[in-house]
Image: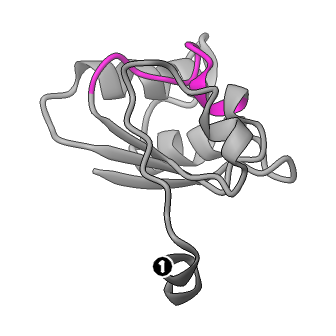
């Protein structure tokens, strides 16, 4: 499964997780809400998955434990170098050169 979530302030991560829950056809009446039900599905599935949090303005929104599942692959992009430095020690940071940024 692949998911692409916008992480800007104009669309909270909560809305992205609600969209993922809808696409996975998770029960709407889940007492824990779409964030927890999506996180549970991502943590328990045997399928491979990738979540991309693109253009993150506040890295804390994407790294909060209640948004991150316990397994799988996550890519977080940001244009703010100071935000990238806030990511935990077990992650990998790959800065892009200006020429690479303009061709993307």
| Camera-nearest residue between 95 and 59 | 95
Q: Is residue 19 magenta?
A: no
Tell me if I can see residue 15 in this picture.
no
Residue shown at 62%/18% (left/top)? 64
Give the labeled residue for mark 1.
100
Neighbours of disc 1 within 10 Å: few (<14), some (14-19), many (20+): few
Q: Residue furthest left?
A: 46
Q: Is residue 68 magenta?
A: yes
1 vs 103, left or right, is left
- Determine the secondary structure under disc 1: helix
Tell me if I can see residue 90 in this picture.
yes
**Picture quadrant of residue 93:** top left
66 vs 75, left or right, is right
| Camera-nearest residue between 96 and 12 | 96
Residue shown at 43%/53% (left/top)? 3
61 vs 17, left or right, is right
Q: Position of residue 45 (x, y in %)?
A: 21, 27
**Picture quadrant of residue 30:** top right
| Camera-nearest residue between 25 and 61 | 61
**Picture quadrant of residue 13:** top right
Q: Position of residue 62 (x, y in %)?
A: 62, 32
Residue shown at 68%/34% (left/top)? 59
Q: Position of residue 5 (x, y in %)?
A: 57, 52
Q: Position of residue 18 (x, y in %)?
A: 61, 40
Q: How is the image coloured?
A: one colour
Examine the rendered structure and indicate whether residue 6 appears above or below residue 38. below
Q: Residue furthest right?
A: 10
Please give the range of residues in magenta: 61-71
Residue shown at 41%/21% (left/top)? 69
Examine the rendered structure and indicate whether residue 55 appears above or below residue 7. below
């Amino acid at each position: 499964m692949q998911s692409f979530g916008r992480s800007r302030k104009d669309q909270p991560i909560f809305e992205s997780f609600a969209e993922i829950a809808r696409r996975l056809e998770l029960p709407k009446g889940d007492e824990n809400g779409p964030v927890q039900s999506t996180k549970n599905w991502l943590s328990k599935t045997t399928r491979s998955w990738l979540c991309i949090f693109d253009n993150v303005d506040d890295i804390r929104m994407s790294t909060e434990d209640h948004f991150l599942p316990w397994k799988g692959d996550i890519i977080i992009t940001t244009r703010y170098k100071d935000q990238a430095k806030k990511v935990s020690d077990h992650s990998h940071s790959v800065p892009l050169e200006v020429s690479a940024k303009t061709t993307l």
